[in-house]
Amino acid sequence: MRLSIIAGLCAVALAATACGAGEAGSDRALAGQTVDVIGTWSGEEQVHFEKVLDAFSKKTGAQVRYTGAGDELPTVVQTRVSGGTPPSIALVAQPGFAAQLAKSGAIKPVGAEVEDAVTANYAPIWKQLGSFDNRLYGVYFKVANKSTVWYNQKAFEAASLPVEKPATWDKFLATSRALADAGTPAVSIAGADGWTLTDWFENVYLRTAGPDNYDKLTRHEIPWTDETVRVALRELAKLFGDAKLVQGGSSGALQTEFAKSVTNVFDDPSQAAMVYEGDFVAGVISSSTKTVVGQDAGFFPFPSLNGSAPSVVTGGDMAVQFKDDAATTKLMQFLASPESGSVWAADGGYLSANKGIEPKAYPNEVTHELAQQILDAGDNVRFDMSDLTPAAFGGTKGAGMWKALQDFLGDPTKIDETMQGLESAAGKAYKP
Amino acid sequence: MTHVLRARRAAEPGRSPGKAVLFLLPALLILGALVVYPLVYSLLRSFFDASGDKFVGVHNYVETFTDPRTLIAFRNNVIWVVVAPAAVTCLGLIFAVLTERIRWATAFRLILFMPMAISLFASGIIFRLVYEEDPARGVVNAAMVGVHDVFSPPSPYPGARPRSGLTAGDLGYTSTATVSPGDVVSLPLVGYSPQRLPNTARSASKSESGHREVRGVAWLDVSASGRSGEIDPTERGMPGLTVEILRDGAVLSTTTTGDDGRFVFPDLAPGQYSLRLPSSAFALPFRGLTWLGPTLVTPVIISSWIWIMTGFAITFIAAGLSAIPRDALEAARVDGATEWQVFRRVTVPLLAPLLLTVFVTLVINVLKIFELVFVIAPGSVQEEANVLALQMWQVSFGAGGDQGVGSALAIILFLLVAPAMLYNIRRFRRERS
């Protein structure tokens, strides 16, 4: 008796599902399946990403559950993997961590369809960055252009200075000094967050030492006590070491978090004229201040040093899969397609290395320019070094590269100590 | 009669071990799964490497004691144990004794107990904001700046500095070249925003030279496409600036600049003089202390812990106070003891065992401190504020992910807490017997 009731219910449920699929008029073959996605995004970015996932759900019928793990994503993922309940897909910002997961067998190589999509839509460098041991594991869903300096036009006007985007580091320093003369601190530096300092260093190093040394230093084939590191730190010290140029001086900068460094520049009245960080600064400007990107807020590429060619430091979130069920594979495929990126691109705060995304998918000219800069940069694109190094060195709060550069910001005359500190931390972290 | 006796004997403890085990089994199982197994597993794990496959002996312990980060954490834990529990016990005692006498004792204690009801994470966020460096956001620095500015008003032109012609010294900026009567001196200043000049400031212009007088103009040499060191049409004087004239290093007289930035030193004998702008006019505004900087961060976190835990100590000590025999206190008072003597010679000795228990409990609590440090310390000073429990978490689950060293730290932490625990257990047992 009871059995027949259950059977009846099942039949009804099945019929309902079938009807639902019929009405939607699309292939809802994955209805009833759940994909568990974990990423770093929270707040506004989470809303945008969930829109992308909703588009997938609408298309396939699969449920997607998203968890925002913030900065602690590697910890959360590692804990879930050792606990035997890995997510279906994680969006990992550190290729080093992804390599670790690939080596331990926690993540699976992508299927042939996903690989085809990546080959078709992305430049070879992105495929290379997503591969470990010559097998493709990761799809770069969202990338960052970390070679942009953002300025507030109003701050320049208040200082009675014309906005001329400095193309070289010397001109940038001259502009900074002119701003300081007019009573406006030139830059706000987010020293409380170590990762912004690693980005400062990487941009200067990529330009002073060149891409080849950059790769070598990333793999720790040359030590951090190398002369090229000294040259880069010396250039940085020209800016960091001049208390007039840095909002709040060194100690003030060390208490400034990233979001605060942006509002320092773009709030009214502004407390500094420029802030260096990636394209995502635009998102913070729009969400936390009244300044409009493209009007008073603009950007220029990180200035060239000693005649270096245009170079871009990038970062990105790579989707990797821990499971290979149908719904997970389908979502990976979706994330590799221009379709998914276009959804978020329309909302702003998003760049993609996906060639298939139409320029008009981006909400404004600034965003499109940022994306185009990455597509055009060609061989001079380098991935964020601190994300490529072992996480203990390049991605831990209060340790390794973060801490060494924070100490350097605290006292920029200590170049030797900084180099030794970096080398000893790297020596430990790169240990096989 | 015998029937009754036999029944009583059967009910005595120790007569039916089988039944006892049966009743204890659920508790034993839970204890075993949640306490003994993790403890033993952590101990074993601490002898294996990061992957957990290779036996490394005591290497993890060696690494722990040679890692500078862990040593800082050790040092901070010592500071915590020395300062925090004693402070909380003392404050608890003081408040408990004082609140015993007032009308609204319960309400007062309730308020003091309230911080205990807030999660440590939330308290951490509160104190993170309280101690924020920017006076516009952090209430402590806002108060400090407010008080400071009442007694010494902020300088008129903070951050401004001469563009050229003056050298910085201890007392201010002194002119490099000497001046003599009849000269007209230009003092171009920069580093200050033209928008912030007082409304009274008027266009600067160079004055005519005067006989037996040193004249000059101090102006803000900042304008759109302005020439440096020259007075451009839109550039304005800096009113109210103090200028000193010196002869042989001694101040001869002092004047202030007018609305157009001009100043005059009249009636000077012929000779060589120099000018000085006292640095007090350019002092950067007082912005309070960097509470969350490397030197103050641990005291700041300890202060917030004291705020949270004082209520806990008050509750315990107040309970102990109400259990003190009143006649002992009354007898002392009748014998003519002052209130202070009663407190010192009667109340405290009677409370001593309880105070010790509270103290030891707080020591245990302090050794395990984690959340407050994690939340309050900004990323740039987390190393300086580090404590063992936080270090353990970072080492095991942080991006490095070495649970071998993490387990070693957990065992060390356990060994540090164990004596305090044992002491408390023995006390409880003695009290019962």
Image (tube, coloured by chain):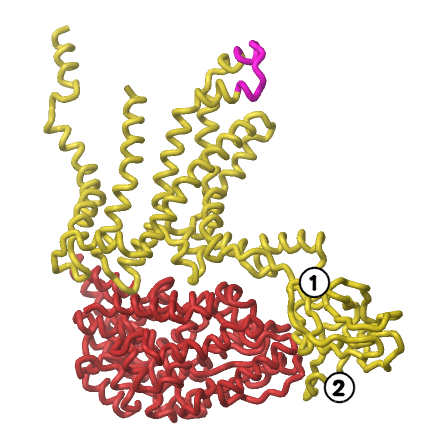
Chain colours: A red, B yellow
Residue B358 in percent (x, y) is at 40, 32
Q: Which residue lies at the image location 29% right of the left edge and 65% below the top edge?
A: B399
Between B243 and A369, the one nearer to me in the picture? B243
Say whether residue B336 is magenta. yes
Q: Which residues are magenta?
A: B331-342
Q: Secondary structure at mark 2?
A: loop
Specify whether B345 is left or right of A28. right
Which residue lies under the disc numbered 1? B280
Q: Earlier in the sequence, mark 1 or mark 2?
A: 2
Q: Secondary structure at mark 1?
A: helix
Give the quadrant of the C terminus of chain B. Answer: top left
Query: Residue at 20% across / 56% down in the picture?
Result: B404
Q: Residue at x 25, y 46 (%)?
A: B412
Q: Confirm or deny contact between disc 1 and disc 2 (CB under 8 A).
A: no
* Above or below, A205 relative to A246: below
Near-viewer residue (B65 or B126) = B65
The residue mark sitting in front, 1 or 2, is 1
Q: Is residue B57 above or below residue A334?
A: above
Q: Position of residue A130 (x, y in %)?
A: 26, 81
What amino acid does circle 1 point to?
Ser
Answer whether residue B50 is magenta in the image: no
Q: Quadrant of residue A70?
A: bottom left
Q: What chain is tagged by disc 2? A: B
Q: Quadrant of the N terminus of chain B?
A: top left
The residue to which callout 2 is attached is B232
Q: Chain of mark 1?
A: B
Other-residue count near label 2 (Cα within 10 Å), few / some / many at <14 / 14–19 / ≥20: some
Residue A431 seen in this snapshot: yes
Circle count: 2
Q: Disc 2 residue type?
A: Asp
In this rendering, do the residues under marks 1 and 2 share a single chain? yes
